[in-house]
Amino acid sequence: MRLWLLGVAAVLAAAGVAAADDKADAVVKKAIEAQGGADTMNKYPAARFTMKGEISVMGMDLELSGDMAFVSDKFRMNINTSVMGQPIVVHQVVNGDKGKRTVKVGDMAVQATNIEKDEIELSRLGRQVEKLTPLLDAKKFTLRTGEDEDVNGKKAALVIATPKGLDREFKLYFDKDSGLLVKSAHQGKGPGEGGAQVDVYQESFPSEYKKVNGLQVPTRLEIHNDGKKFMTATLSDYEVLEKLDDAEFKIDD
């Protein structure tokens, strides 16, 4: 009898897991439709935009401007700011499994480092997760739901995505009404003391969506590292594109 009961318990537990997976799939599918639908999302895998806002570095709140572009396994970002009137430019580019980050103060390059492969892989996975459609590929991700949470005063459904073969979680929070992504969170990389990259718990809050080429895109982004506000930016000149010239992702020697 005890063995039979254990067998029933195992079946019920498995059924519970399947139900949770089905619920997670449903939440993601709703989000995909809210963003514009899988066909439109797959038609426009590339994006480019400019940004303007504030960034907090080493206890200083600095104004920033910049631009970003990405497609598939390629990514480029420029950030411009200044400290005590001295202009600072951070340029970061990833192309496949290679990446480089350079920092210029005035006209002088003060740092040029290759981006570690684990950071590149984490960034690539993060873009796949926030693209949403790859989440429905059971060979790439395992999904499960968590408890609903409040995000900016509204209820959000939580889906936890785990890449196959990697012990890391990506948490995605979707507005219960609109279905749009309102928060994502994962253990990632951020600037520590002296600007070196360190492990941080990063939370991103996209908001103020607008439609571009049939896709809903955020025009405001707030990022917290370890619970502290790191960056707030308004995104403009937003383009969603079928492709981008590979020259945009050239890595200088």
Image: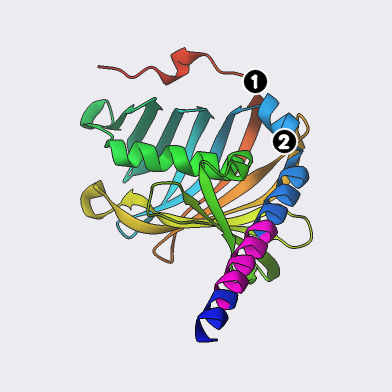
Quadrant in which the N terminus appears: bottom right
Vertical arrangement, residue 78 with respect to residue 243, above or below? below
- The answer to if 12 sits in the magenta stretch is yes
Residue 218 image-quadrant placement: top right
Q: Main secondary structure of the magenta part?
A: helix
Vertical arrangement, residue 110 with respect to residue 159, above or below? above
Q: Where is residue 11 in the image (x, y as percent from the top left)?
A: 60, 70
Name the amino acid type tagged 1.
Glu
- In the picture of the structure, the residue carrying the numbered disc 2 is 38
Does residue 208 appear in this view?
yes
Disc 2 to disc 1, how far (Cα)? 14 Å
Q: Residue at x 70, y 56 (%)?
A: 27
Vertical arrangement, residue 31 with respect to residue 115, above or below? below
- The answer to if 228 sits in the magenta stretch is no
Quadrant in which the C terminus appears: top left
Horizontal placement of 82 versus 132: left or right?
left
Magenta stretch, residue numbers? 9-23
